[in-house]
Image (cartoon, rainbow, N blue to C red):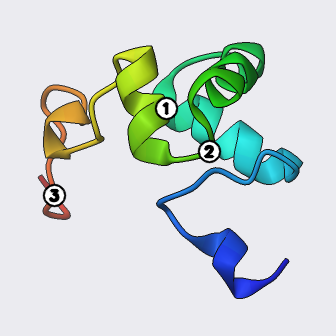
Amino acid sequence: MNPSDRTLNTINDRDPFAMRYWSKQLRISERDLREAIAAVGTSTQAVRQYTNRPQASHADRPRGASRRRGD
């Protein structure tokens, strides 16, 4: 894997690990991810828009989850 494949701006559709990672991040199946990539390319922003998945944020944490230890 070359350094340009390790960016969060694109999805390496030839890397099984990357495909599993992005399907989990976007909460879609790998099949749906491949369909999205075929439609809009490998840009994570384009795939997010195509699948209507917002970028992950702290709001994605489960209710009651805390950043601090011991809470």
| Amino acid of disc 3 | Arg
| Amino acid of disc 2 | Thr
Relative side of 38 to 43, left or right: right
Image spot of residue 34 (x, y percent): 74, 25
Relative side of 17 to 24, left or right: right
- Gap between marks 3 and 1, in whole Å? 29 Å
- Judging depth in this view, the residue of 62 and 27 nearest the camera is 27
Q: Which numbered tag is attached to residue 42?
A: 2
Residue 41 placement: quadrant: top right
- Residue located at (15% from left, 26% from top): 63
Indicate the secondary structure of the residue bearing disc 2.
loop
- Gap between marks 2 and 3, in whole Å? 32 Å
Q: Measured along the vertical axis of the image, is residue 66 above or below residue 55?
A: below
- Judging depth in this view, the residue of 36 and 57 nearest the camera is 36
Q: Which numbered tag is attached to residue 47?
A: 1
- Mark 1 is surrounded, within 10 Å at the Cα level, by few (under 14), some (14 to 19) or many (20 or more) other residues, namely many
Indicate the secondary structure of the residue bearing disc 1.
helix
Indicate the secondary structure of the residue bearing disc 3.
loop
Identify the image quadrant of the N terminus: bottom right
Looking at marks 2 and 3 on the same chain, the residue that comes earlier in the sequence is marked by 2
- Residue located at (72% from left, 51% from top): 18
Mark 1 and mark 2 residues within 8 Å of each other at the beta carbon:
yes
Residue 55 placement: quadrant: top left
| Amino acid of disc 1 | Val
Looking at marks 3 and 1 on the same chain, the residue that comes earlier in the sequence is marked by 1
- Mark 3 is surrounded, within 10 Å at the Cα level, by few (under 14), some (14 to 19) or many (20 or more) other residues, namely few
Q: Residue furthest bottom?
A: 3
Q: Which numbered tag is attached to residue 67?
A: 3
Q: Measured along the vertical axis of the image, is residue 71 above or below residue 33?
A: below
* In this view, the mark in front (2 or 3): 2
- Residue located at (67% from left, 14% from top): 32
- Gap between marks 1 and 2, in whole Å? 7 Å
